[in-house]
Amino acid sequence: MENLVTHPLSKTSHDQYGQFAIVGLAIFLGFFFLIGAGRLLVFLYPLTALIVGLYLFQYCPKLYIYYVFWLWFLSSLIRRIIDFQAGEFTAGGFYTTPELVTLISLTTFIRESPKELKSIGLPFILCLGTIAYGTLIGLINNPLTDLSIVDTALGFICPIIFGFHLYSNWPEYPELCRSVYNIFIYGILAMSVYGLYQYVIAPEWDRFYLSFTGIQARGTPEPFGIRVWSTTSAAHQLSFPMIAGILFSLCPPITWISYITLVLGSLTLLAGVVRTAWLCLVLTIFLFIVLVRQQYQSKIVGILGFTIALISTVVISVSEFSDRISQRFSTFQSLESDEALNLRTEAFYQLFEDIVFDPIGKGFGFFLESISDISSGDGTFLPMLLWFGLIGTVIYFCSIFLLLGKILTTPIDPSDSFSIAVRVLCISPLPMMFTGQYFPEIPGLVVWTFLSLGLAAHRYYCVRQILYQ
């Protein structure tokens, strides 16, 4: 019989040394930035971060989880500062460092996945198999002239194996929940503060990034001109952790810290002007209110009413902010004249026959930009069909639906507001698939985190029910 007597997330005697290692890394980075020697961090940052990650994984399991999330949250900003001080785009992707540290958890997957084949292991293996297939086909069809194939593959793989690592801690589900809650509350608070600073001030490294890339969809390099992406690399990516953090800030008991996160996170999400994210946030909060205990519903509605009034006052008082938000909201009334939407729709119809009915796919390294006017970041379905083919894409999504089915049939304690929030977050961001990538990098990290937490809740409550019958 399964039991709940394991304590991998308990505090250890090594935690103090782990904290020293993390603080030491932060001081190390700060020193190089202060003396303007960011170029030296191109290789030193991934190397030192990996060494710290190896120590935390081995001796401080709980700190390792915190560390991985914060690396994903902050590494794009760190990379932009490095590039700014170097005066050019340097080697590696924006998320190379968190990917390397996340890959450490592959040992958990190798060790534990064979034991989980009869329960949840198979969908994880099928998803990883699909990615391996896309990588192999990509290497065959697209000679390896740069690291784009490896970078894309790691962007898909890392969220899956880290999600499985989180799931493997299911016997300590309550402690795991507390850890993830704290990560998102404080993480989104930090990202919101920087996001609003980015919007109002437009730091030099962010202006350099916009000028160098020339990507008009991310705004203009001037105050109140940036389409806020904060410490991530795109507004679409920022939306995923923001929606999760805003929802967690509504989980009882609501503290001053969580309320500040709610207000600042909502303002930052508005400044990102991602319409699909706004709709997903409304859907997320609606589902949460419907599912929580009735005694909490009126309290949450009251807090939301006050928050909306407060945010409206802030938006109206800043003319640049109000003009931008009202202009974006007005597009909901005239979707037929929306250039971005029309471009995606037209490209979908043009590519549908060629891509959808290709059973094999072209693999990683091949991008929509080369055959259409849209990018591989403008949706989820077409890029996946292009990379994995029809067969691979169907296998991937069937695996996701298998996991969702298990999660949504889990009996949950109505007083466990966090587990309700996790269940909501497994389904409410789904519309984001139509406007951007859903499974790689930060979106994938968030998606697989809550899929894995939902599975951990299923396992935890089922075992507890058996033990206490």
Image: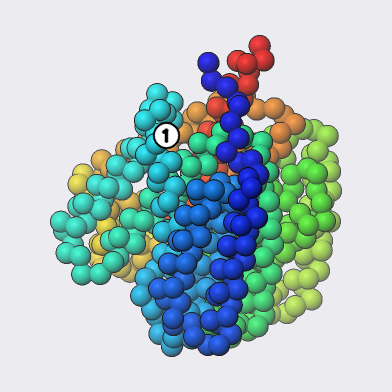
Q: Position of residue 171 (x, y in %)?
A: 58, 31
Q: Position of residue 318 (x, y in %)?
A: 75, 78
Decide if residue 72 is on the left or right side of residue 43. right
Whether residue 448 is visible, yes or no, is no
Residue lying furthest top in this view? 469
Residue lying furthest front in this view? 13
Counting every numbered tag in the picture gives 1
Mark 1 secondary-structure assignment: helix
| Residue at image coords 74%, 44% | 251
Name which quarter of the figure residue 174 lies in.
Answer: top right
Decide if residue 189 is on the left or right side of residue 140. right
Front-most of residues 386 and 145:
145
Q: Residues within 10 Å of mark 1 (few under 14, many from 20)?
A: some
Decide if residue 157 is on the left or right side of residue 370. right
Name the residue carrying label 1: 112
| Residue at image coords 46%, 61% | 51
Instruction: State the quadrant of the C terminus.
Output: top right
Q: Position of residue 276 (x, y in %)?
A: 55, 57
Q: Position of residue 275 (x, y in %)?
A: 57, 61
Front-most of residues 85 and 322:
85
Q: Considering only vertical position in the picture, is 226 above or below 394?
A: below
Whether residue 189 is visible, yes or no, is yes
Q: Considering only vertical position in the picture, is 99 above or below 88?
A: above
Colour scheme of the picture: rainbow
| Residue at image coords 71%, 33% | 416
Report the amino acid beneath label 1: Glu
| Residue at image coords 53%, 53% | 56
